[in-house]
Amino acid sequence: TDLLLPGVSLGDMGTTNGLITALLVAAVLGLLNSIVRPLLILLTLPVTLVTLGLFILVINAAMVLLADRLIDGFTVNGFWWALAFSVVQWLVQGFLNTLDGGKGRRSTES
């Protein structure tokens, strides 16, 4: 991430500690996105509706900043870098979903 987003650091990725930090960031972001994020979306629903959903990017940036506070070795240099990180994360997830072809999602069809 240092090359793509210089304001976001996962430590030295050439070491075991860097890899552990990256896995820890993924796990913590997964937990935050499944527990805290839905509550924030519900609480900020009027703002999210007025901004046509763009406020969700701010919520995602807040999740990244919270992960920064919780994990040693993961550093985000401010809100704008957290926002950039969340946009890159969104793009990567979208790309992986297109490769998956939607197979990972539950189907309601019988």
Image: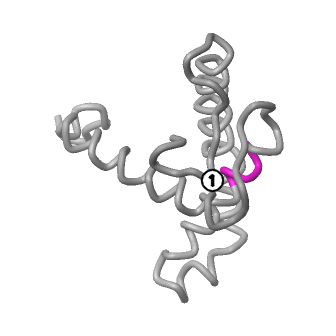
**What is the three-letter code of the residue carrying label 1?**
Gly
Colouring chosen for the image of the structure: one colour
Q: Where does label 1 land, which residue?
A: 7
Q: Residue furthest bottom?
A: 50
Instruction: Name the secondary structure under disc 1.
Output: loop
How many numbered marks, from 0 up? 1
Residue 82 position, x and y percent, is: 63, 58
Stretch in magenta: 63-67
Magenta span has 39?
no
Residue 50 position, x and y percent, is: 55, 89
Q: Main secondary structure of the magenta part?
A: helix
Q: Residue furthest top?
A: 16
Residue at the location (64% across, 63% down)?
A: 59
The answer to whether residue 32 is above or below residue 22 is below
The answer to whether residue 65 is above or below residue 16 is below
Which one is in front, 103 or 72? Answer: 72
Q: Quadrant of the C terminus?
A: top left
The answer to whether residue 69 is above or below residue 100 is below
The answer to whether residue 93 is above or below residue 110 is below
Which one is in front, 63 or 10? Answer: 10
Snapshot quadrant of residue 107: top left
Residue at the location (63% across, 83% down)?
A: 46
